[in-house]
Every structure is written in structure tokens, then in C-alpha cells.
Image (cartoon, grey):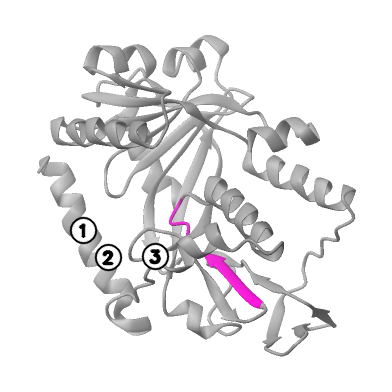
Amino acid sequence: IRERIKRYQIDCDYRPGGLFVAMNDKQLATLEEQKENWERYGNKQLELLDANAIRREVASDRYTGALLDHSGGHIHPLNLAIGEADAIRLNGGRVYELSAVTQIQHTTPAVVRTAKGQVTAKYVIVAGNAYLGDKVEPELAKRSMPCGTQVITTERLSEDLARSLIPKNYCVEDCNYLLDYYRLTADNRLLYGGGVVYGARDPDDVERLVVPKLLKTFPQLKGVKIDYRWTGNFLLTLSRMPQFGRLDTNIYYMQGYSGHGVTCTHLAGRLIAELLRGDAERFDAFANLPHYPFPGGRTLRVPFTAMGAAYYSLRDRLGV
């Protein structure tokens, strides 16, 4: 992502550094193990922080420690997407919006139909993720579940207040099963997200769900106005691993990033490009992973998953 931002001069407010914060000693021990595992696979830009050190990085007393990943960071994802769409056009590609696919014909060549036309293609890549629906390729819907997450942003904060919250402008996520995540924006707002709605139903009141989480982390922001609120969907898999594979000899799919779509989609794009050039090794490393269906099928997968999430959330609260 950093290389692409630099190559195409994409203005998307990239800032380095990401924190995984622990809510209790058990989570901190898990972060210690995570650090060892990541270092084993080549990430040497990790730093474990104790309770005192994390308070210097985040003005909250909720955390017992953290793992700081200097190789991580945060961006404005919409501006990144717009910049990459411009890069596609610059390289001769075409981008069609508001062109919902109604059918993919499994032939050679393949045919992709929309309400107003069709495209004949040597290859088709199905990458609709949480917005694909269950009619175009029903087989994919069995292996995943759309979920909703909620986000708010505050009014603009003063420079002093914004920097007092997260002095080095890192992005932050906690280690709970249903995690909170937040960062500062380029114009000094606090963007705060949290909570999951299984089945991707939009809640009636986003602020009612998220503001208490924000104030529990930063009680010093009591009374700050909320200027924006929204929801968005991600696609959950049972294993939390992305799902890559083939639907036909010339039709491929990539989906199920389970909340890590900004980074994992860029990896997926590179692997599918390698595949189309004749090198399937790295794509197949993911494609060969088992893609488990959710228990309960389409009818009961949402309540079953919600029950499991409630159990793990209780364990988080109890610190067990």
C-alpha cells in the first residue's frame, strides 16, 4: 500500500504506527505470543509496551499494555480507493459504477450480465465481498456472513486536545472479541468504531451504540459533539481467514477478509495478478485452505454466531 501511494502520489493521509491494546493481563500475554510469532516471520518492527508506556501513547487508563507495530498505520480509505481507481484509468483500465451484476454465465469466454448490458471476458474475478449478495454466486454465500460495524466521528478538536489523546497519531484497536478501534483524522476529529451487527442489519441509532464506548475510553471527551455517523459491512468467515478460490476454470473469487479488508484486498489483488500471469503458487496457498460453512446454515447462522460472540464477550469482561 505504501509503495502504491508513493508511485501514484495518492493523497490519503497515511500515518505510520498501529497499537494493539490489551484490556487485561491475559490479553497482554497473548500479545507477547503474537510478537514472537510475527518476529519469527520477519516483522522486526514490533515493540511491547507495559501499562506505563501505553499511557504515554494513549490518554486512557483502560489498558494494561500494548503491542506497537511500527510497520502498521492508518489512512483515509475512501481517498485511497479513489486514487487507485484513477491509477487503473491511467493504466488503461475502465471503472464502471452503479452497474450491479445480475448473472455470471460460466462459459468460455464468460459473460457478466447487468441490468443494462453485458460484458464478455476471458477471466472473471468475483470480489464483491460483503456486498455480493446471495443470488449471483450462491455457493459463496454459504461460506461467509455479512456483518455490520458502526463508526462515529467527533467535531473538530483543538490541536492540543487531539494530540493529548494520541500524541504520536497512531491508530488503535483493542484485543476484545468484539473490538473497539479508533484514530485521529487529518482534520483533528476522533474517529471511533465498535460493535458488530451479525447479518449486516443497520441499527436504529449508531450514536447510542458507539458513544458510550468512546466515553469509556476517553471520559475527557464528555460533551463533545458527534458530527458524523455511519455503518458499513464486512464479510466474516468462520476461520477468520480470507477465502480465495475458483468457481470455474476462468472464474475466480476473493472474499471474507473479516475486518481486515484494506490490507488483505491489496494482497489478494497481487496474488490474482500473479495467477493471471501464470503463477498460481501463492494464490493456491490460500485457495487450498478449508472454507468452513457457518453452523446453522443461512437460517440459523446469525443467531448461532451472535450467541458465540456473547459468550466470548463475557469472557473478555471477566478477563478469562
- Tell me which amino acid carries mark 2: Ala
Q: Callout 3: few (<14), some (14-19), or many (20+) C-alpha neighbours within 10 Å?
A: many
Q: Is residue 253 magenta?
A: yes
Could you tell me which residue is drawn at 31 percent across and 49 percent down? Answer: 178
User: Which one is nearer the viewer's eye here, 30 or 122?
Assistant: 122
User: Which one is nearer the viewer's eye here, 225 or 131?
Assistant: 131
* Displayed quadrant of residue 159: top right
Q: Is residue 139 above or below residue 52?
A: below
* Position of the C terminus by quadrant: top left
Q: Callout 1: few (<14), some (14-19), or many (20+) C-alpha neighbours within 10 Å?
A: few
* Displayed quadrant of residue 128: bottom right
* Local secondary structure at mark 2: helix
Residue ID for mark 1: 310
* Position of the N terminus by quadrant: top right
Residue ID for mark 3: 237
Task: Give yes or no for contact between labels 2 and 1 (Cβ–Cβ under 8 Å).
Answer: yes
Disc on the earlier residue, 3 or 1: 3
Res 4 seen here:
yes
* Local secondary structure at mark 1: helix
Q: Is residue 57 above or below residue 44?
A: above
Q: Which residues are magenta?
A: 251-259
User: Which one is nearer the viewer's eye here, 265 or 38?
Assistant: 38
Is residue 207 rendered to the left or right of residue 13?
left
Residue ID for mark 2: 306
Q: Position of residue 270 (x, y in %)?
A: 64, 52
Q: Position of residue 77 (x, y in %)?
A: 63, 42
The span from disc 2 to disc 1 (Cα, nearest Å) is: 6 Å
Could you tell me which residue is drawn at 47 percent across and 57 percent down? Answer: 257
Q: Position of residue 243 (x, y in %)?
A: 47, 65
